[in-house]
Image (tube, grey):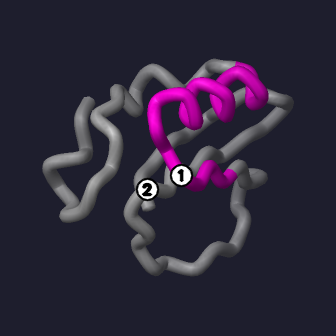
Amino acid sequence: MSERASFPGNNPSDDLDAYPGLEQDEAERRARERGWTTVRSLPPDAVVTMEYVVGRLNFTVADGRVRRCWLG
């Protein structure tokens, strides 16, 4: 799934569906290797600001594994 086309900016071309299920450390390393400038790992139900930041990839992490991945 490429969400890149949905948002302006210079996000890396990446398959966001490939992250759920990965261990947190592996997902963060992979994201940085693919060019994401900011990688944010959050617990389930975390309260976060809604501003969109180009180059940022967000993960919801539970039990050490990525459960959800989204841009900005």
Q: Which residue is mark 1?
A: 37
Quarter occupied by the N terminus: top left
Can you name the residue that lies furthest to the right here?
63
N-terminal of the two: label 2 or label 1?
1
Question: Horizontal placement of 14 versus 2: left or right?
Answer: right
Vertically, is 51 above or below 22? below
Q: Estimate the x, y position of residue 52 in percent, counting from the top left.
A: 40, 72
Q: Is residue 52 left or right of residue 5?
A: right
Kindly identify the amino acid type of the residue bearing the numbered disc 2. Gly
Dot 2 and dot 1 residues touching (CB under 8 Å): yes
Of residues 32 and 65, the one nearer the viewer is 32
- The region drawn magenta spans 23-40
Left or right: where does residue 20 sit relative to residue 23? Answer: left
Front residue (pair 70, 38): 38
Helix, strand or loop status at disc 1: loop
Q: Residue at x 28, y 34 (%)?
A: 13
Specify few, some or many for label 1: CA neighbours under 10 Å numbering under 14, 14-19, or 20 or more.
Answer: some
Say what amino acid the circle numbered 1 marks: Thr
- Give the x, y percent position of residue 55: 43, 56
Q: Residue at x 64, y 74 (%)?
A: 48
Dot 2 falls on a residue whose secondary structure is loop
| 64 sits to left or right of 20 | right
Decide whether residue 1 is among the magenta residues: no
Q: Residue 21's spot in the image, x, y percent?
A: 62, 20
Dividing the picture into quarters, in which one does residue 45 lie? bottom right
44 lies above or below 26: below
Residue 50 vs 41, above or below: the answer is below
Q: Residue at x 19, y 64 (%)?
A: 8
Tell me the CA gap for discs 2 and 1: 5 Å
Q: Which residue is mark 2?
A: 55
Q: Position of residue 11 (x, y in %)?
A: 33, 50
Would you identify the image quadrant in which residue 66 lies? top right
